[in-house]
Image: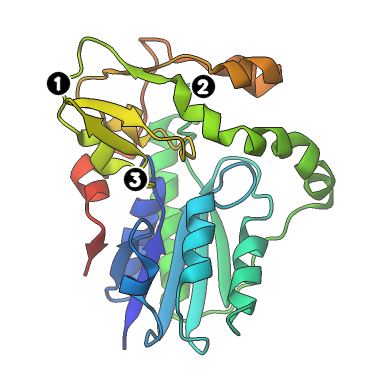
Amino acid sequence: MRKIIYYFSGTGNSLRAAIKIAEKIGGAELVNVRCVPEDVSAKDADIIGFVCPVYEWDVPGTFKNFIDQLIINPNAYIFMVTTYIAVLGKSFETVEELLQKKGAHLNYGRALRCVASQCIAYPPFPPEKIMIPYMEKQMESAGVEISQKKQRAYPRMSSITRKRYKKVMGPYLEIEKEYDKGFYTDERCTGCGTCAKVCPTRNISMQGRQPVWNHHCHGCNACVVYCPKKAIQFKTPQAYKELKTLISRMLCLPEKRKRYHHPLIKAKDLMCDRKV
């Protein structure tokens, strides 16, 4: 029986979930969605999983594009798990629509609350000493249910969120390519290239031992939180200043702010694209 889990992870919450679920179902191939879809087909898989965070009330664009191009076995048991803070939006509905085009559907969908990791906008919360154990229990529970091939209806977007989605999230999606213009390095940068290696969208290239952001960033902040020297800084891009919304006004990165990533996920884990 072939089991495969595709994941997108920036600060490690989703990768940790994928690892825990793989353990509970007796092992599975873990595949980062920055791989080429044709090279990691699931056409002969019996169990297929998708694990990712919720960004802008949806799945990351890279995750969406990957699934759209992926070949799968429509008869497989298919599950999806998201990590999120407050609003799920249409994340599960997006993936279900993509699967239906392939003659498949989600057999199981579950959302797991996790530590907020958007350090560019706010400090991590709730407290890690409380939330990490809770996250582990959620992940283990999901893994047990998936190992039993349980059927679980996926969470849907609330009517309120549906009405507000375009108005609230639309402006951010329109200027998403401007987000990484806020990143820069200070004198602590050693040119180690960790930022480029952990980036889940391969958005960073190294030029003259300096990272360059190439404007297909989802704002996961993997580069920021895994930099061993805390050399990556952020200033609000002009496009976000002009947006003049609450979130855009919150964007900053004070020196003393905790740069959270899941404590059990190291930079080397995010650098690995496939793991059996």
**Residue closer to the observer: 151 or 249:** 249
Q: Residues within 10 Å of mark 2 (few under 14, many from 20)?
A: some
In the rendered structure, which disc, 2 or 3, sits on the residue that comes first in sequence? 2
Query: Measuring 68% from the left and 55% from the top, which residue is drawn there?
Result: 90
> Percent position (x, y) of residue 220?
44, 37
Q: Residue at x 35, y 64 (%)?
A: 36
Mark 3 neighbour class, 10 Å CA radius: few under 14, some 14 to 19, many 20 or more: some
Quarter holding the N terminus is bottom left
* Label 3–label 1 contact, CB within 8 A: no
**Distance from Cα at disc 2 to Cα at disc 3:** 25 Å
The residue indicated by pointer 2 is 122
Mark 3 / mark 1, whichever is N-terminal: 1
- Describe residue 252's horizontal placement relative to residue 16 as left or right: right
Which residue, given by chain and number where applicable, does mark 3 sit on? Answer: 202
Q: 229 above or below 52?
A: above
Q: Amino acid at mark 1?
A: Thr
Q: Amino acid at mark 3?
A: Arg
Its colouring scheme is rainbow
**Mark identifier at residue 46:** none
